Amino acid sequence: MRYYLLAILITGVIKSYGQNGAVDKPGAFSISGKLVNRDTGIIVLWYPNTAGVFIKDTSYLKDGYFNFKGEICEPSFAHFIGSNRPGNYADFFLEVGEQQVLIEENKFSDLKFEGSNTQKENDVLNMELRELDQLAELIAEEHKKLKGNAADSLDTNKQNKMHELEKKLVAVGTKKKQLRMEFIKRHPDSYVSPTELLTIMNSIYTNEAITLYSTLTDKIKKSRAGKLCAIEIANRQKLLAGNPFPDFTTIDIEGKNFSLTNQKGKYVLVDFWASWCLPCRKAVPQLKEIHARYAERGFNIIGISTDKDKNQWLNAVKADQVGAWINIHAADSLRELFTAVQVLPTQFLLDPYGKIIWSSLEKNNESLEQVLASRLN
């Protein structure tokens, strides 16, 4: 999933790269490969060409052997795609020059790649991450068994065990994030580093992302992934505390025209959420308490749903009984305006002038409730 999302992110900004031309001088590459346990059919190489556009090149297998040739402008995040079965997708770093690869059918992630120094750096990190991935799989499997066997949802013992396993999964995820952050700090001149920064961008605070990006060398900052990091950080910086929150107009859940400007004079919490987001739904009781406590003192909540299906949004609003505040569905125009909101829930607290004074994208000294209490009590 991580690699698929990265590919989507990268291709999503290809136009900005393509308009600026190549990052560096083009160079030829060649890949000689062997696919074990499948002799015929095709294998696809997905990589960015010299114009910065991701293309899919196809090679036909001959007794399991395949070849690719082309040109790239820098060590590039690329992908092999095999038959339409689980395990036949792998990512790697392609470089100018001759490279050799050995892949096994249904086990693409175990590929052996020679001739790319960037891939060697990536392999070192992947070895560290793989142990944590295996541990996470074991924990998830144990959690799945408990969940399946817990016919009685009131079984306190089983519920406590499940909560402990969930905490362990979070701890493993945190460790993986820390490994990636340490890798970036130790490898400021590696093309792997900005790709890893993109991987963790939505799980770290904006100031952490800025700090990690600042450690990269100028060469890496000018790479495709480096430029994408810069775009992501720039979008998030616009939503840091102290900046005015972007004004917008839209239609609310009641079909009425809504403008953020009309909320001037109030403290406003802008809450991005979705019906499928469990943390978002679990936060509703707390939001209700906050709204009830401060609504008469000049406070309001604007819930912006990112659901693609409007019916799911409407059903969730009804089920959670959050009609006491303003509910909006994020149309395409709003999604374009708030590109920095990539993880849910994301919240911004605005002062009566429409300026951001608290954001969940930042590491805050005070909680949302503490800020509201100091302002409104």
Image: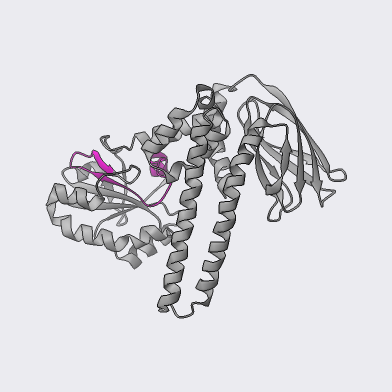
> Could you say which is closer to the camera, residue 215 or residue 47?
215
Q: Does the magenta stretch include residue 196?
A: no
Q: Does the magenta stretch include residue 338?
A: yes
Seen as rendered, the residue at the extreme bottom is 152
Residue 215, placed above or below residue 134: above
Residue 157, placed above or below residue 184: below
Marker count (numbered)? 0
Residue 29 on image: x %, y %? 73, 28
Instruction: Point out the stretch of residues depicted in magenta.
Output: 333-358
Seen as rendered, the residue at the extreme right is 63
Residue 149, placed above or below residue 179: below
Q: What residue do we see at 68% from left, 56% from top?
A: 86
Residue 139 on image: x %, y %? 53, 63
Query: Could one spot residue 4 in this view of the protein?
Result: no
Residue 206 on image: x %, y %? 38, 38
Q: What residue do we see at 54% from left, 37% from top?
A: 195
> Could you say which is closer to the camera, residue 245 or residue 251?
245
Seen as rendered, the residue at the extreme top is 25
* Colour scheme employed for the rendering of this structure: one colour
Query: Could one spot residue 363 in this view of the protein?
Result: yes
Q: What residue do we see at 13% from left, 56% from top?
A: 296
Residue 66 sits in quarter: top right
Residue 321 sits in quarter: bottom left
> Could you say which is closer to the camera, residue 302 or residue 47?
47
Residue 240 on image: x %, y %? 31, 37
